[in-house]
Image (tube, coloured by chain):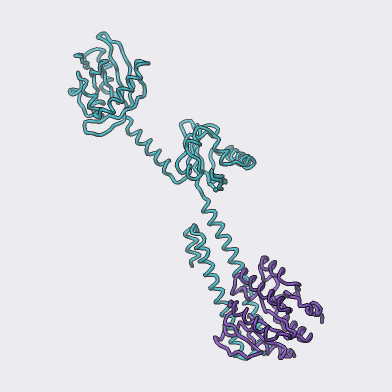
Chain colours: A cyan, B purple
Amino acid sequence: MGKTMTNRDEPGCIEAGILENALVMIAVMEKSGTILAWNQAAETITGYSKEEVIGKTTIWKKLYPKKEYRDSVTKQIATILTTKKYFENFETIITTRSGASRIILWNTKESTHASGSIVVTVGQDITRLRELDAFRDSVIENANVLIAVMESEGKIAVWNKAAEEITGYSRAEAVGSRDIWKQLYPDSEYRRTLTRQITEIISTKSYFANFETRIRTQTGETRVISWNTRQIGGDMQYAIAIGRDITEQKKAEEALLAYMTEMAMRIQQPVGIVRDNLLDIAQLIRDGKLSSDEIAMLLDAQVRNAAQIASNVQEFQKAILDKNREIPEAYRKFLEG
Amino acid sequence: MALIVNPDELARKRIFLVLATPGNIRQRNIDLIREVSDLGYHTVVITTNFPYSILSKLYGEQGIDLTKVSFIDAVTRNSLGSAEEIPGIVRFINNPANLTDMGIAVTEILKERSGQKVCILFDSISTLLIYLSSPNISKFIHFVTNKLRLMDISGIFLATEKGLDPMLMNQLTTFVDTVIDTG
């Protein structure tokens, strides 16, 4: 206690200048916790000035006002210091003068000085970084597409909530190994085919787009996934795979195809019958075998037939719509006429 | 001219499915009536295609004895809205889709003709497709063929060739004894 460091004091003006102008928070203190130096970044980050801090130990209570948390931090520091004289990348949350929380990544170094041992503490404000991390994690976590980040050879590093929901396999089951792929593609022949196709695609470009596969979920259900991948990371050591569950879309497409086929049958035959009847009536008229009343009655019967065909088509459209609510909106509008 | 249905089979109360091209189906109807009438049968024509009045006129022009033909007409009332029944000659049903009424009419007319040589001619299954789904047509034909067998009566069902979906065609062939494609 009682020692303070200024620009004019040891360990020298240059070092003091560096300390003062560093972009990270630097606190020099005695082993007891008494602050000897408190740079400008420390003032900016915490909101506490040099005058309030230097020569005292009270700053720590201010930075960690909640006793429970402060005790926890103290305990962690004590544990670290039992094995080494410094700590690295130790993360705490401080409370600033304004009451805001900041996340600080601490690194310390003990230095023996002529006037005794001092501890140089460097605190990096990583609040923004953590916010970005949290934002990214939140985007990944809450995306309604399956997101898997893979390390080399397909080992899973990230497995989001949608991945859990779509596949039925939890994060704990997926992360840390590549076994998940065998579970999703249990048929070895199909797996081999996919691997070959993926290898072929990757050999020409480092990603694939809209690559459709059929996975088997944990409950044994088959789902169709459309995959898009990208290489990520500083040296491209990761791959991110984004899988969109297109099972319902496929079903809707198949329903639409079935609808078109059925409609062709349901319209073609009856329309053919009406056509043949009209041809027959025309022939009878040409042969002079029908009176005008009879012609009217026959034509009226064909009108009834045509009206019934139109009604059938409408009923069929309604049935298709009721049956498959997943039909895309554009198709639905088309079906509704 | 060669006969369409074998008289021996008809005598054994067999049930036939006769297929014809759309252009020929009306003529096949007339040919069959003539054949069956010549064999001494009274024919009950169930028509879903042409009204009884026109069919009977066409039959008359072709020299068919109209006393040997009676009708269940599913067309006239559907077109005109009303028509008076003529006992022993014609019964009307309101709509080809009204299978209950059609079934009742078949049952009653067969009772009326009990003890006579009767043959049913259904013209045509294809037209029913406008009004009914394939499964319902199949059920109705199954009902009629069962009725015919129980009452020991022969029957002929007319349909346009290639006018039925394969599944319905498969089912119909199991209900009838003989399928005849007349072209």
A302 with respect to A18 (left or right): right
Quick check: B164 above or below A214? below
A102, B83: nearer the viewer: B83
A293, B105: nearer the viewer: B105
- The residue under the point 28% across, 12% down is A117
Q: Is residue A231 visible to the viewer in this orientation of the structure?
A: no
Quick check: A142 above or below B26? above
Quick check: A20 above or below A212? above
The image quadrant of residue A115 is top left
Task: Give the quarter of the figure containing the N terminus of chain A.
Answer: top left
Give percent across and percent down for residue A87. Answer: 35, 20
Q: Is residue A139 visible to the viewer in this orientation of the structure?
A: yes
B180 with respect to B47 (left or right): right
Give percent across and percent down for residue A245. Answer: 51, 48
- The residue under the point 68% across, 76% down is B147
Give percent across and percent down for residue B182. Answer: 76, 75
Give percent across and percent down for residue B22. Answer: 69, 76
